[in-house]
Amino acid sequence: MTREEFLARFGTVFENRPDLAAAAWDRGPSDPSAGSAGLHPAFVAVLRDLPADALLAFLNAHPDLAARSARPADLTPDSRREQGSAGLDALDASAGARLLELNKAYRERFGFPFILAVKGKRPGEILAALESRLRNTEAEERTEALRQVERILLLRLKGRLGEA
């Protein structure tokens, strides 16, 4: 697979950051036949090598979950699909208001949006995770946010490779 083919297939697994996918290509392995288990470490290494300020900027590029102020164009197709599969596009008014309130509290406390790999989760689980993680320290939460991004990357790689 050429670099261009790789980027056409995997360039959007990072939230609006094809340059990070290009950096993963540069680390290799770049052969999708290695599967997500072979590709994921290169993508994770790119994230872990970001300086603290660049990582914070990357985290801040993620959308708030179910943000009613976000226009559909503000969400990547992956984010739209993931949030929809978790039912976040169909919250009732009460749950939607609670999620917005918790998102705001989270962003104020930690300086970046709440990030969770929502695939396979229900709205109640997502709200519970958000409430629980608001009790974390800043260091714990940066670590957890990065862990969640790594999980999202794995799920997106699996999706592009047709893995279950």
Image (cartoon, helix red, strand yellow):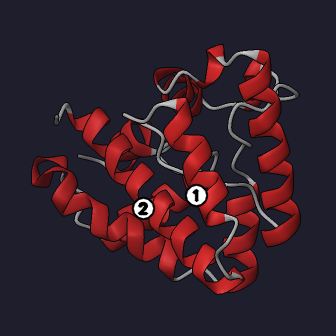
User: Which residue is drawn at the image coordinates 10% and 48% (left, top)?
Assistant: 33
Q: Nearer the viewer, residue 144 or 135?
A: 135
Q: How dense is the environment of label 1, judged by Cα within 10 Å: few (below 14), some, or many (20 and up)?
A: few
Marks 1 and 2, how far apart at CA: 17 Å
Question: Is the residue 96 above or below the residue 21 in the image?
Answer: above
x and y, in percent, of residue 29 in the image: 22, 65
Locate residue 154, reporting x and y percent. 33, 52
- Name the one closer to the observer, 28 or 78: 78
Asked if residue 115 can be seen in this view, the reply is no
- As shown in the figure, which amino acid type bears the numbered disc 2? Glu
Name the residue tied to disc 2.
150
Q: Which residue is mark 1?
A: 19
**Mark 1 or mark 2, which is nearer to you?**
2
Residue that lies at the very extreme toward the left in this rendered image: 33
Q: Secondary structure at mark 1?
A: helix
Screen quadrant of the C terminus: top left
Residue drawn at (55%, 42%) of the image: 126
Q: How many badges with numbers are in the image?
A: 2
Residue 73 - label: none
Q: Nearer the viewer, residue 62 or 20?
A: 62
Amino acid carrying label 1: it is: Asp
SS for dot 2: helix
Q: Residues within 10 Å of mark 2 (few under 14, many from 20)?
A: many
Query: Is residue 80 in sight in this rendering?
Result: yes
- Residue sitting at x 34%, y 40%: 5
